[in-house]
Image (cartoon, rainbow, N blue to C red):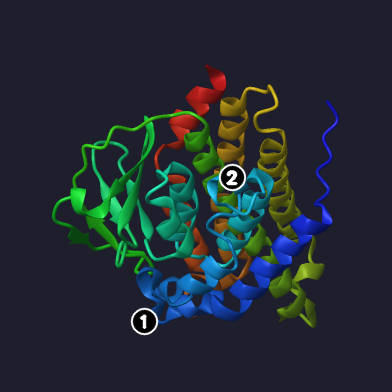
Amino acid sequence: MIVNLTPTEEQQLVEDSIRGLLAGKLPVDRLRESHSHGGAAERAIWNDLAELGLFGLGLAEERGGIGYGLPEEVIVAKALGAHLASPSIIAQMIAVHLADDATRPALMSGEARAAFVNAFDGGAHLIDGEGATHAVVVGQGGVALVAIDTLGTAEPVELIDETVAVAKVSTSASLSGGAEAERLSLLLATYMAGLAGATRDMAVEYAQTREQFGQPIGAFQAIKHQCADLALRAAGAETQCYHTAVTFGRGNDDGVEVACARLLAGEAALANAKQNIQIHGGMGFTAECDAHLFLKRSHLISMLGTSKAEVRKRILA
């Protein structure tokens, strides 16, 4: 089957709209300031995201959504990753699909807010949960939407990554697989593809401007090869994610396709983040450089609901 992966005019408009908003409201360097941590900057523009139609972008019109599909949602997810947006935005997007008719309108308008609970490997942790009314619980068994007050008392957890707020909670939610669980996994994969693309761009820009021995370091073959590796990994992840979105529900083994996207994007995000730090040299290891933010976020997203070992098992099964 021949698949056209060229974005349509409408899809390009979606990408331009979300990137324009994020560039103005969620610059990556905001995370150097503590007042922007824990999804604070995202909460400040929640109504803007709702007015843009972001939360119901992939929901059918008869269910109150915008009427686009999964390809448009992954376009948004990639942009969110590139700007290190709070994963709560992805949680809100999937919550709209999981909600019943009574709850959905409030989620669509942004009046009700969702956040992730990672219920993998025996624990349950709420991520950027301040102000949330609902939790998207994600684990190996699938996904579920529950009211936030069912999670018990939240106990804050200290992390090396101070840009996200994490609290230990408890949940007895019954998780289910199916199309919405696959949708969520693909959106998380595409978020990581966005991380990989952003670190590629960051490394290339630095290699073009940083000079040693009278010339840009990008002129040296070793740096050229590293930048090429960054580009290949990012392109592979983006292509797999978009191909999976376009062909989703057309008779392919969606679970395997999504798992491949999750594996490729996760590896690309982590490898590119590490190599970006190396290309930046000593500066890359400092808090003043944004490079470390992408490495920390890559680790966080890659662990949501699953592990690399579990993803590989699914592909090989």
- Which quadrant of the view contains residue 3? top right
Give the amino acid type for the residue marked by disc 1 in the picture. Answer: His
Relative depth, front residue between 248 and 229? 248
What is the three-letter code of the residue carrying label 2? Glu
- Vertical order, 202 against 300 (above or below): below
Query: Relative to 223, is 21 on the left or the right?
Result: left
Residue depicted at x 67% and y 36%: 244
- Provide residue 130's location: percent of width, then percent of height: 29, 67
Q: In the depicted view, which residue is nearer to us: 105 or 188?
A: 105
Q: Quadrant of the N terminus?
A: top right
Ranked by sequence position, the earlier of labels 2 and 1 is 1
Residue 62: image tag: 2
Name the residue located 58 percent from the left edge and 34 percent from the top edge.
258
- Tell me if residue 73 can be seen: yes
**Residue 155 picture location, percent across and down:** 16, 59
Q: Residue at x 67, y 49 (%)?
A: 68
Dividing the picture into quarters, in which one does residue 70 lie? Answer: top right
